[in-house]
């Protein structure tokens, strides 16, 4: 088959942010997304709000933008219109990779044939997808660049996974992982790390095979952590856990934006892009999901290793000129704030401990996540 790649402006950027709806009093998940969407009606700002797989979830999306800052402005418009609707419902929105204590068996799937098909096929793994993420799209002007950029982004999967890790809890248990979402989501048949194809024809053959055997109905059902998005003309990075605030979201968006533009420039200059064997990429993803900001990651194909917090400053220095060119220097600097304040999973555990652990501690975590969303930045643990 032919898999067409839509025309796209180089390094245009779009953001998608999945958010949980929670009860303002108990902190538990609320199944009110359909009611919210109905209430939004024709509000012009509602174009930034979409329903999702579960009835406890909404997604805020940006337009195609020139900068990460512009995309964040779109998301903030979506957040504002949601809050206008849910406040009278005694509901709040919360950003994280998982909910700290809600049980997956009590969640309802949105009434849509596509979602019903997922649950019917995947059964318990499908019903357990009570997870929330962030997706970053970056425009690619030449299809020949797409697969080399995808392969190079895999070298930085661990950085993005660790920085965004916000799902230490699952069903009221501390999993011992920084990102439980990473392990839950990859159980879907077409999710997880992508194949490292070198030719577009290989991706077309894969897609044809998956369609012919009934694994997928269209390419959008390929849910890789990093994937081409041919219908948009972008590379889409989906590895990140849901974030609790726009400062961290902007930082992660800027990091992806800069990496893609950096690799695109290297290709223009005829220089070699970084790559890593599949087995190292898999190990890095697991280490980042398990240990988060304490992960010792594999840096290159030679197997050199380094603590992720030591590797990050060097990466940010390398990307600084790219960030200036893209107009996201301030947003990229938010990576330093994540390191300073601790990633979300670290803050969540500190909040739970400060409130005595157990159910009271987890309810305090929800309140802290809601407060960070409203504040737009990480908050001190109280």
Image (tube, rainbow, N blue to C red):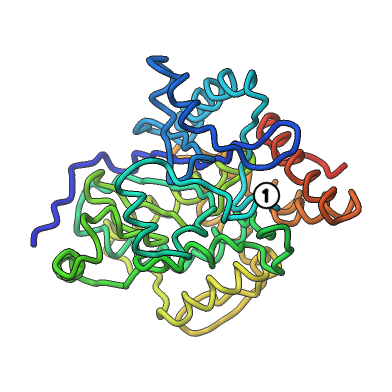
Residue 118, located in which quarter of the rendered image? bottom left
Q: Residue sitting at 90 percent across and 50 percent down?
A: 354
Horizontal side of residue 57 vs 188, given as left or right: right
Residue at the extreme bottom:
302
Return the residue nearer the eye: 241 or 36: 36
For the question of whether residue 217 can be seen, the reply is yes
Return the residue nearer the eye: 180 or 87: 87
Quadrant of the frame with the N terminus: bottom left
The answer to whether residue 84 is above or below residue 215 is above
Residue at the extreme left:
1
Tag 1: Cα neighbours inside 10 Å, few (<14), some, or many (≥20)? Answer: some
The answer to whether residue 124 is above or below residue 79 is below
Q: Residue sitting at 50 percent across and 52 percent down?
A: 319
Return the residue nearer the eye: 48 or 237: 48
Instruction: Give the image location of residue 150, x and y in percent.
Output: 34, 62
The answer to whether residue 275 is above or below residue 258 is below
List the residue tagged with mark 1. 336
Horizontal side of residue 290 vs 42, given as left or right: right
Quadrant of the frame with the C terminus: top right
For the question of whether residue 321 can be seen, the reply is no
Horizontal side of residue 154 vs 222, given as left or right: right
Residue 49, located in which quarter of the rendered image? top left
Instruction: Give the image location of residue 145, x and y in percent.
Output: 25, 58
For label 1, the SS is helix
Horizontal side of residue 34 vs 162, given as left or right: left
Instruction: Give the image location of residue 177, x and y in percent.
Output: 67, 67
């Amino acid at each position: 088959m032919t898999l067409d790649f839509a025309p796209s402006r180089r390094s245009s950027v779009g953001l998608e942010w999945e958010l949980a709806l929670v009860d303002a009093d108990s902190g538990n998940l609320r199944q009110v997304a359909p009611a919210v969407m109905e209430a939004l009606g024709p509000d012009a700002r509602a174009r930034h709000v979409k329903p999702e797989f579960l009835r406890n979830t909404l997604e805020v999306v940006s337009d195609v933008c020139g900068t990460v800052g512009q995309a964040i402005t779109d998301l903030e418009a979506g957040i504002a219109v949601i809050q206008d609707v849910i406040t009278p419902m005694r509901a709040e929105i919360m950003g994280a990779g998982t909910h700290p204590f809600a049980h997956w068996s009590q969640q309802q799937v949105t009434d849509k044939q596509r979602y019903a098909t997922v649950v019917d096929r995947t059964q318990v793994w499908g019903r357990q997808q009570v997870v929330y993420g962030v997706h970053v799209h970056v425009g690619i002007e030449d299809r020949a660049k797409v697969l080399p950029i995808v392969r190079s982004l895999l070298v930085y999967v661990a950085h993005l996974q660790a920085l965004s890790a916000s799902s230490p809890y699952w069903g009221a248990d501390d999993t011992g992982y920084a990102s439980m979402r990473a392990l839950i989501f990859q159980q879907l048949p077409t999710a997880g790390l992508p194949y490292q194809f070198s030719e577009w024809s290989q991706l077309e053959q894969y897609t044809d095979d998956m369609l012919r055997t009934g694994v997928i109905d269209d390419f959008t059902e390929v849910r890789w952590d990093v994937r081409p998005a041919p219908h948009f003309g972008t590379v889409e990075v989906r590895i990140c856990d849901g974030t609790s605030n726009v400062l961290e979201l902007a930082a992660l968006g800027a990091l992806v934006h800069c990496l893609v533009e950096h690799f695109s420039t290297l290709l223009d200059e005829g220089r070699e892009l970084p790559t890593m064997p599949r087995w190292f990429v898999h190990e890095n993803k697991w280490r980042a999901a398990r240990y988060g900001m304490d992960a010792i990651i594999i840096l290159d194909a030679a197997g050199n290793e380094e603590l992720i917090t030591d590797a990050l400053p060097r990466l940010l220095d390398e990307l600084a000129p790219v960030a200036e060119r893209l107009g996201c220097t301030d947003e990229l600097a938010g990576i330093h704030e994540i390191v300073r304040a601790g990633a979300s999973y670290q803050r969540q555990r500190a909040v739970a401990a400060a409130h005595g652990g157990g159910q009271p501690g987890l309810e305090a975590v929800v309140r802290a996540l809601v407060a960070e969303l409203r504040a737009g930045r990480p908050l001190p643990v109280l």
